[in-house]
Image (cartoon, rainbow, N blue to C red):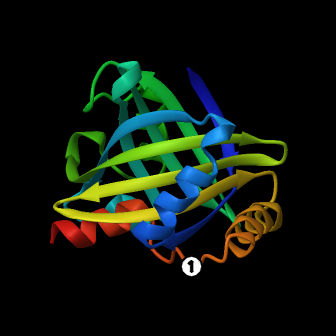
Amino acid sequence: MNMENLEIEYKVMVDSIDFFYLQEKLKDYRPETFIQENIYYDTVFEQISRNDLSLRVRHIKNKKKFIATLKEKVGDARKEYEYEVDGEDSFPKEIIDKLNEYGVDYECLVETSRLTTFRNEYKLENGVLCLDENHYYGNVDYEVECESSTLEKAKKIVKNLLDKNGISYQESKLSKVARANRYRN
């Protein structure tokens, strides 16, 4: 798996009761389930986050797979560079070269945080809906996320689902890596 793609997603936070209600409500859609451990990296001088990038290796435990991902902001989206790798501290030449373009020395990378996500993924006609239970350093939060071809479509899918089920929510202002870093400190 070597690929570049544009990730357009909309995320909201919900409470645990509403999250498990949604899981029950959507069980007939037979989601694909994953247990993912995300390990995030930066330099001690935060060169990755200062360049509005994020770097992680995702260990998909039930598939015994490691995927290195570098994300860079492009308008409302993020361009993702994803490569299957051998382990949690492996980075392919393509990501190392991209980091070098931003003046980031691969040799200076350190692990900044990690989290485990229990994900239910639902394939929809207009996108992919995910229900994520995220565990970071003794903290848990619940997120509904949708990837689609436009931000408006992703928002509409999420808002329709939650409004139809009378679920209140708040937009995710912080990314998973930002929340993991906050909980770690």
Residue 40 location, x and y as percent?
31, 50
Residue 99 location, x and y as percent?
43, 45
* The one of 94 and 28 positioned closer to us in this rendering: 28
Residue drawn at point x = 60 percent, y = 43 percent: 27
* The one of 181 and 147 positioned closer to us in this rendering: 147
Identify residue for label 1.
169
Name above or below for residue 109 compared with residue 137.
above
Residue drawn at point x = 60 percent, y = 36 percent: 31
The C terminus appears in which quarter of the rendering?
Answer: bottom left
The N terminus appears in which quarter of the rendering?
Answer: top right
Residue drawn at point x = 83 percent, y = 48 percent: 126
Q: Is residue 182 left or right of residue 60?
A: left
Name above or below for residue 85 compared with residue 153.
above
Residue drawn at point x = 61 percent, y = 76 percent: 167
* The one of 163 and 124 positioned closer to us in this rendering: 163
Name above or below for residue 26 compared with residue 94.
below
Q: Which three-letter amino acid code belongs to the residue tagged 1?
A: Tyr
Name above or below for residue 47 compared with residue 4.
below
When asked about the image quadrant of residue 165, the answer is: bottom right
- Exactly how many numbered labels are in the figure? 1
Query: Which SS class for mark 1?
Result: loop
Residue 26 location, x and y as percent?
63, 48
Label 1 environment density (alpha carbons within 10 Å; few <14, some 14–19, many ≥20): some
Residue 129 location, x and y as percent?
65, 50
